[in-house]
Image (spheres, rainbow, N blue to C red):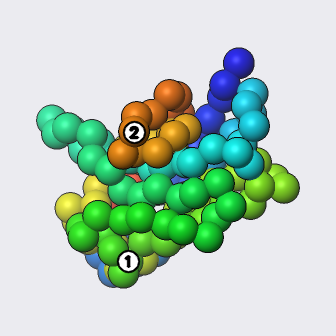
Amino acid sequence: EVQLVESGGGLVQPGGSLRLSCTASGFSFSSDFMTWVRQAPGKEVEWVSTINPGGRTMFYPDSVKGRFTVSRDNARNTLYLQLNSLKIEDTAVYHCARGDWRYGLTARGQGTQVTVSS
């Protein structure tokens, strides 16, 4: 059974930082693209980042490029998302997902809440 468990969310002031983690099990983590998405209340799911299996190629939308960094530790089956220079509009539930955003996601975790507020 594929399981993805996110952690690391919380309340942070604008300009602050957080590091999210996602622990994966039930599949060959090191062989798969992995993706972060987020969803704010009343809004559609928004792609945040994708990383290739080897961890050397990353993709971001313009909305987070230069502020967010995705990484992975294949030995620990763990995906990370470093969030810097956070803005109020980054408030959302952040989910990690198995797959490449461009071609479809096959599993998604329950998510971790990130709230940016002064």
Looking at the picture, how far across and down is residue 91, in whole percent?
29, 55
From the viewer's perspective, is residue 16 above or below residue 73? below
Name the foreground residue: 10 vs 26: 26
Instruction: Say which residue label 2 marks.
Output: 103
Looking at the picture, how far across and down is residue 68, in whole percent?
42, 71
Name the foreground residue: 117 vs 34: 34
Q: Which of the two discs, 1 and 2, sits closer to the camera?
A: 2
Residue at x-position 62% and y-position 38%: 5
Mark 1: give few (<14), some (14-19) or many (20+) Cα within 10 Å. Answer: some
Query: Extreme right residue here?
Result: 75
What secondary structure is marked by label 1? loop
Q: Which amino acid does label 2 sit on?
A: Tyr
Query: Extreme left residue here?
Result: 42
Q: Residue 2 carries which label?
A: none
Q: Which amino acid does label 1 sit on?
A: Arg
Name the foreground residue: 29 vs 41: 29
Residue at x-position 63% and y-position 44%: 32
Q: Quadrant of residue 24?
A: top right
Residue at x-position 49% and y-position 66%: 58
What secondary structure is marked by label 2? loop
Name the foreground residue: 17 vs 12: 17
Question: Can you see residue 13?
Answer: no
Q: In which quarter of the image is the C terminus?
A: bottom left
Q: In this view, does 10 lie to the left or right of 26?
A: left
Residue at x-position 39% and y-position 39%: 103
Q: Is residue 81 left or right of residue 31?
A: left
Q: Quadrant of residue 19?
A: bottom right
Instruction: Say which residue label 1 marks.
Output: 67
